[in-house]
Image: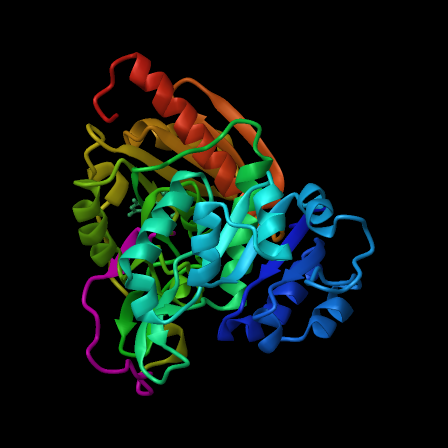
C-alpha cells in the first residue's frame, strides 16, 4: 500500500512515543522507506537505537553525526510524506509559529511534503485555548490532524488526549497517501458525509440470523478518506464493521437490522451533503422471529425441513430524498455486473452507483482490494484492482467531479 513511499517519522517527547516503533514496523511492512527524527525529549521515552535498527538508518538527533550534510534539510527534501507522532503541545506550538529550535522542528520547517500530525497529550493541554488555536492554524495551513482519543491517560484518569492505536494511524496514512496519489485534489472541507458499512443481520431466533459476507472494509476505507479530505463523517456500522478500528474524529453509529439502518440513514439524509450506502443490506427478514431457539421436531420425518416466511425490508436508498443530498449506492453483483448496476442507478433514483463483482475472491467481500465501475447519469469510469483506500479516494474524486458538473447546471443538492 505504501510501496516506494519515503516517509519521515518525526517523534516528539510524549509518553505515547513508546508506541512509535510498532507504527514504524507497520510502515515498513506496508512497503515504505522510513527515516526518523527525534527531539531530545523524545529520547527519554524511546531509544534512537531501536528506531535505527528498525529503519536501518541513523536517526536525526541533535548532536550525532548524520550520514548527510545539513541533516535536517536533507531529510526535508527526501520525504514524500511526514508524520509527527506523537505531536506534543510544545512542538505543535512551534510548528504553528515557525520555530526551529532543534533538528526536528528545523526539518519540519524546511519540509514541503504533506504532513500528518498525531497529537497526544494531557486532556487539559489538548483543550487549552492555545493548543486549540495552534491546531486551527495548522489545519488552515493544510496539515492533516488525527485527533486524539477519549480514554484512559497515563496520568491515571480519563479524558481526550490519548494517541490512537498504531493500526489506526497506519490506515489514516493509507488514506492520505491514496488522496495524495490522485492527480486532482479532493477537498470535502465543511461537507457532511454519511456512510454505511458492513452487513445487516436479521434474527431467525435468539441464536441464528440471516446475514451476508460484508466485512465493512469498503465503507470504513471511504470514511477514513473522506475524513482526511476534510469532511465531517458519520459512519453507520452494521455488526461486522463494528470491530474495525476507526479514526477518533469519525462519528460512529451502530445498527444490526435493515430497519434500524433505514431509520438512521433517513435521519442523517436530512443533514448530509453526500450519503454513501456501502453496507450490504438484507432485502428480506423473517416475518415471525421466534423468541426461543427453534428446535428440531423429532416427531416429523427428516425431509419435512423448516419453513421460514420472509417479508421484504424497505429499500433504504430508494426511500431517501435526493433533492439536497448527493446519493451514492453500491451494486454487489455476481453476473451482468454493469447492466444490473445501470438498472439500479435508474430504479433507486440515486446520483451514482459503484458496481463491484462479488463473485471474485480477491475483490469485493472481505478482501483488502476491490475493482469497480463508477456510473453516474452521464459518465462511466472503471477503476482497476487496487487497495480499498485507493478505490475510496477514486470514488470520492468522482463524486466531487460529478457534483461540480451538477452545480453548473444549477442543481439544488449543492
Ligand atoms: O464490506 P466489504 O467486505 O468491504 O465488501 C464491500 C461490499 C462488497 C459489501 C460493497 O462494496 C458493496 O457492494 N456494498 C453494497 C452491497 C449491497 O447490498 O448491494 P445491492 O446490490 O444488494 O444493493 C444496492 C444498493 O442498495 C446498495 O448501496 C445497498 O446498500 C442499497 N440497499 C440494498 C437493499 C436495501 N433493502 N436497501 C438499500 O438501500
Query: Can you say which quadrant of the picture contains the C terminus?
Result: top left
Which residue in the rendered view is the most extreme toward the bottom? Answer: 298
Q: Is residue 364 visible?
A: no
Corner quadrant of residue 120: bottom left
Q: 26 or 285: nearer the eye?
A: 26
Q: Is residue 108 visible?
A: yes
Q: 320 or 275: nearer the eye?
A: 275
Q: 160 or 306: nearer the eye?
A: 160
Q: Which residues are magenta?
A: 280-299
Q: Residue at x 21, y 58 (%)?
A: 260
Which residue in the rendered view is the most extreme toward the right? Answer: 67
Q: Residue at x 25, y 44 (%)?
A: 315
The structure's colour scheme is rainbow
- Whether residue 47 is situated above or below residue 261 in the rendered picture: below
Q: Is residue 34 left or right of residue 382?
A: right
Q: Is residue 170 left or right of residue 286?
A: right
Corner quadrant of residue 189: top left
* Residue 154, horizontal then vertical, whole percent: 41, 81
Q: Is residue 289 left or right of residue 229?
A: left
The main secondary structure of the magenta stretch is loop
Amino acid at each position: 500500500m505504501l510501496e516506494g513511499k519515503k516517509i519521515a517519522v518525526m517523534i516528539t517527547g510524549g509518553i505515547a512515543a513508546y508506541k512509535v516503533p510498532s507504527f514504524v514496523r507497520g510502515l515498513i511492512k506496508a512497503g515504505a522507506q522510513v527515516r526518523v527524527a527525534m527531539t531530545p525529549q523524545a529520547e527519554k521515552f524511546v531509544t534512537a537505537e531501536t528506531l535505527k535498527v528498525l529503519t536501518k538508518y541513523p536517526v536525526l538527533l541533535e548532536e550525532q553525526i548524520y550520514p548527510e550534510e545539513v541533516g535536517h534539510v536533507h531529510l526535508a527534501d527526501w520525504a514524500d510524506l511526514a508524520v509527527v507522532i506523537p505531536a506534543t503541545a510544545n512542538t505543535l506550538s512551534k510548528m504553528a509559529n515557525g520555530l526551529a529550535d532543534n533538528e526536528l522542528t528545523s526539518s519540519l520547517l524546511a519540509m514541503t511534503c504533506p504532513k500528518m500530525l498525531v497529537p497526544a497529550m494531557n486532556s487539559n493541554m489538548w483543550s487549552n485555548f492555545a493548543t486549540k488555536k495552534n491546531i486551527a492554524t495548522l489545519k488552515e495551513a493544510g496539515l492533516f490532524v488525527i485527533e486524539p482519543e477519549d480514554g484512559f491517560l497515563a496520568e491515571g484518569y480519563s479524558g481526550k488526549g490519548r494517541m490512537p492505536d498504531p493500526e489506526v494511524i497506519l490506515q489514516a496514512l493509507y488514506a492520505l497517501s491514496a488522496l495524495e496519489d490522485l492527480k486532482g485534489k479532493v477537498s470535502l472541507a465543511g461537507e457532511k458525509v454519511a456512510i454505511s458499512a458492513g452487513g445487516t443481520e436479521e434474527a431467525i431466533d435468539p441464536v441464528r440470523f440471516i446475514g451476508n459476507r460484508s466485512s465493512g472494509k469498503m465503507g470504513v476505507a471511504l470514511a477514513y478518506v473522506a475524513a482526511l479530505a476534510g469532511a465531517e463523517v458519520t459512519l453507520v456500522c452494521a455488526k461486522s464493521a463494528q470491530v474495525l478500528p476507526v479514526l477518533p474524529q469519525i462519528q460512529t453509529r451502530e445498527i444490526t437490522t435493515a430497519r434500524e439502518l433505514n431509520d438512521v440513514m433517513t435521519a442523517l439524509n436530512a443533514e448530509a451533503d453526500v450519503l454513501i450506502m456501502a453496507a450490504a443490506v438484507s432485502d428480506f427478514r423473517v416475518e415471525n422471529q421466534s423468541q426461543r431457539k427453534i428446535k428440531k421436531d423429532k416427531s416429523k420425518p427428516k425431509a419435512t425441513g423448516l419453513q421460514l416466511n420472509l417479508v421484504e425490508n424497505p429499500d433504504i436508498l430508494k426511500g431517501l430524498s435526493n433533492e439536497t443530498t448527493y446519493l451514492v449506492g453500491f451494486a454487489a453483483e455476481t453476473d451482468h455486473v454493469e447492466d444490473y448496476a445501470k438498472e439500479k442507478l435508474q430504479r433507486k433514483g440515486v446520483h451514482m452507483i459503484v458496481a463491484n463483482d462479488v463473485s471474485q475472491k480477491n475483490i469485493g467481500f472481505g478482501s483488502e482490494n476491490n475493482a469497480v465501475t463508477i456510473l453516474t447519469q452521464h459518465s462511466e469510469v472503471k477503476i482497476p484492482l487496487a487497495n480499498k483506500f485507493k478505490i475510496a479516494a477514486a470514488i470520492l474524486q468522482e463524486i466531487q467531479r460529478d457534483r461540480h458538473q451538477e452545480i453548473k447546471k444549477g442543481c439544488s443538492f449543492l
